[in-house]
Image (cartoon, coloured by chain):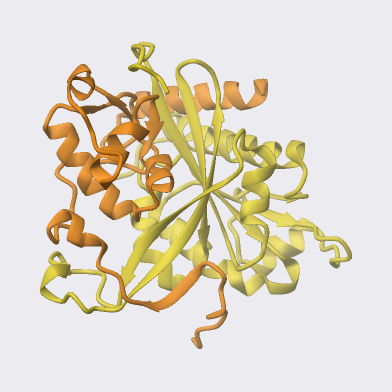
Chain colours: A yellow, B orange
Amino acid sequence: MDFGPSSPPPGAASTKIVVAGGFGVGKTTLVGAVSEIVPLRTEALVTNESSGVDDLAATPMKSTTTVAMDFGRITLGDDLVLYLFGTPGQRRFWFMWDDLVRGAIGAVVIVDTERLDEAFAAIDYFEAKGLPFIVAVNEFDGARRFPVEEVREALALPADTPVMTIDARDRGSAKAALIRVTEYALERITGMRTSVPQY
Amino acid sequence: MTPHHDDDEHVHTARIVRPYALTAGRTRASIDLPVEAIIEQQPRATEREWSEHDQVGQIVSACAGRTSVAEISAAVHLPLGVVRVLLGDLVEQGYLKVAATTLTDTSSTDVRQDLIERTLRGLRAI
């Protein structure tokens, strides 16, 4: 046990990338492939009336649902830590994403070409929020291979949204997805700066 | 749209819990604490004894090294929302503090670009 913290370096920062996608699509696998820690699990609570309920004590027997999020960590130097949060992709978890995506660099939406429809909710959400995202097609063993352009078309993605194939189990591949979404987030900022501002 | 995948391993329905009893029913933290915020102890935290048997004491102990809100939540086995309320109190009481910058909705473009560039350099180097 430490006896107290050392001073954080000046400019110390922490940030996050969200990893979204349908059930069993490889979110935690990707996080685990590149995280320096075994992915940890935390829970958020859902009530049936999760919006507008400030005082749960008033309804003590309210049944609640817990939604688990697995997350990992990558230390990128003395002064910077990147967290990766895997989050369920279904629309009914949107309430949770509002909190999760605030301040995120961007998101990786993992898709399984056999179940492309499971990516729609996440894509709609990130588009609506203006959060930079990429689509990563996880190539499972034995899965049919689709050209990325077919995936782009099937998901009705804008031409500039990066689509790539990955193997979520492979560290280099997981890292490449994180680099791509970070590059894309940067392109979006620098692109905004060079184009005519639109209000 | 018909809901599907209700057998999702990540969802445990119909669990009756009263986790916000720990926060006297409060579900909003007094300060804004994103899940990736890094928390550390203030000197004041080491000037008193914390019980390992109560969750507040466990939270303070979990912050002995700099650690994130999400990691604290995992360490003490409490939902994120509950941990955030308790952390907010401990920060306001001067026992803990937020030890690193995070991006927010109000971060300037310069701040955002700088942090994204640092992240990109870091990712390329690992």
Whether residue B41 can be seen here: yes
- Residue B67 sits in quarter: top left
Left or right: A192 with respect to B56? right
Work out whether residue A112 or residue A75 is closer to the camera in this orientation and state it.
Answer: A75
- Residue B65 sits in quarter: top left
For the C terminus of chain A, give its image quadrant.
Answer: top left
Q: Residue B37: horizontal and vertical position, in percent?
A: 35, 35
Residue A105, above or below A153: above
Left or right: A170 with respect to A52? right
Work out whether residue A197 or residue B69 is closer to the camera in this orientation and state it.
Answer: B69
Q: Residue A131: horizontal and vertical position, in percent?
A: 44, 49
Whether residue B32 can be seen here: no
For the N terminus of chain A, give its image quadrant.
Answer: top left
Q: How many marks?
A: 0
The extreme bottom residue here reads B2
Work out whether residue B122 or residue B84 is closer to the camera in this orientation and state it.
Answer: B84
Left or right: A59 with respect to A163? left
Residue B77, above or below A153: above
Q: Residue A72: horizontal and vertical position, in percent?
A: 55, 41
